Image (cartoon, helix red, strand yellow):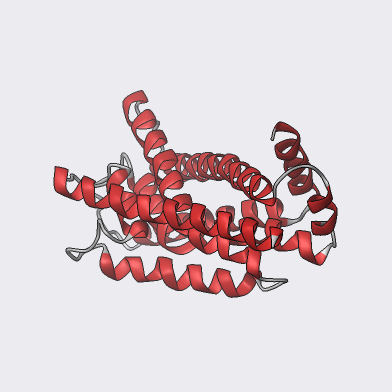
């Protein structure tokens, strides 16, 4: 498994997906900064100056960029095996295809951590540029945890979509489109009674952006458990299909 993970990391370095991912996160961060500058230039008072950009980018990442980004990188790493003709070579080595997929998800988990940290650094930079304030250590670690937890939840949320890419040859954009609609719908659900059932909107609650009851936490756990179970079942089904 270690060799497969290292191999997948090398493959990721050779693609343009990482550059595209960082540029996308940076573009959203710059857009957030421009919006903040516009708000201040119009004379509007910002109540939460200590955490304005950290909260805003966490929200934007959840609904506008991270789900699609994770699906794009994840599905591309899977469909690439077919388009580049390396799938047949993988099947010849004494390693099950399911292990290859699990290795790809683990690498995607590592990339998600890097993406989350980069987005968080961008938020802190914006915070300093506009408000000239250095956040406290308590606030720094609180939001650091929030960004990481949010990223983990978003990865679990889109894992079922990514697992579907094993059935496709080169249709990653179709899954990206699905993830965009999936995440965008969360904007309307977050203020409803279903916000902790819907995985995308639940990510903000689990990240600590609003208080939760024990029942709401249980709903989120069930929701994410369903996502994980669906992904595992799908991967195992693909393995059996390949064997047959």
Which one is in front, 177 or 230?
Answer: 230
Q: Is residue 125 above or below residue 175?
A: above
Frontmost residue, 117 versus 104: 104
Name the one closer to the observer, 214 or 133. Answer: 214
* Residue lying at 85% horizontally and 62% vertically, measured from the top left: 85
Relative image position of residue 126 (x, y in whole percent):
47, 46
Which residue in the rendered view is the most extreme toward the top?
Answer: 137
Residue 8 figure quarter: top right
Residue 187 image offset from top left, x and y in percent: 32, 67
Count the numbered circles shown: 0
Residue 213 visible in rendering: no
Q: Residue 49 in the image: state x and y as whole percent.
A: 30, 44
Q: Is residue 211 visible?
A: yes
Classify 154 as above or below 144: below
Q: Image quarter for residue 2?
A: top right
**Which image quadrant for residue 184?**
bottom left
Q: Quadrant of the N terminus?
A: top right
Q: Along the horizontal axis of the image, is 162 left or right of 17?
A: left
Left or right for 158, reference 70: left
User: From the viewer's perspective, is residue 226 above or below residue 166?
Assistant: above
Q: Position of residue 196 (x, y in %)?
A: 25, 56
Q: Taking 154 as reference, is 96 left or right? A: right
- Residue placed at 42% from the left, 42% from the top? 147
Q: Seen from this angle, which residue lies furthest front?
A: 244
* Residue located at (69% from left, 63% from top): 244
């Amino acid at each position: 498994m270690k060799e497969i993970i290292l191999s997948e990391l090398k493959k990721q370095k050779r693609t343009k997906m990482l550059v595209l991912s960082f540029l996308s996160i940076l573009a959203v961060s710059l857009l957030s900064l421009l919006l903040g500058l516009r708000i201040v230039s119009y004379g509007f008072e910002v109540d939460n100056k200590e955490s304005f950009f950290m909260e805003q980018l966490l929200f934007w990442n959840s609904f506008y960029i991270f789900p699609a980004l994770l699906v794009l990188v994840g599905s591309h790493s899977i469909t690439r095996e077919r388009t580049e003709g390396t799938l047949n070579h993988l099947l010849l080595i004494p390693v099950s295809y399911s292990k290859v997929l699990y290795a790809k998800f683990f690498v995607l988990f590592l990339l998600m951590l890097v993406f989350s940290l980069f987005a968080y650094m961008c938020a802190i930079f914006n915070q300093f540029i506009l408000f000239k304030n250095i956040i406290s250590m308590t606030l720094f670690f609180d939001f650091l945890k929030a960004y990481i937890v949010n990223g983990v939840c978003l990865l679990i949320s889109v894992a079922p979509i990514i697992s579907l890419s094993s059935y496709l040859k080169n249709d990653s954009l179709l899954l990206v489109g699905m993830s965009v609609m999936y995440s965008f719908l969360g904007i309307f659900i977050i203020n409803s009674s279903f916000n902790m059932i819907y995985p995308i909107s639940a990510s903000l609650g689990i990240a600590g952006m609003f208080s939760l009851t024990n029942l709401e936490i249980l709903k989120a756990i069930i929701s994410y458990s369903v996502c994980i179970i669906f992904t595992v079942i799908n991967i195992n089904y693909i393995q059996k299909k390949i064997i047959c």
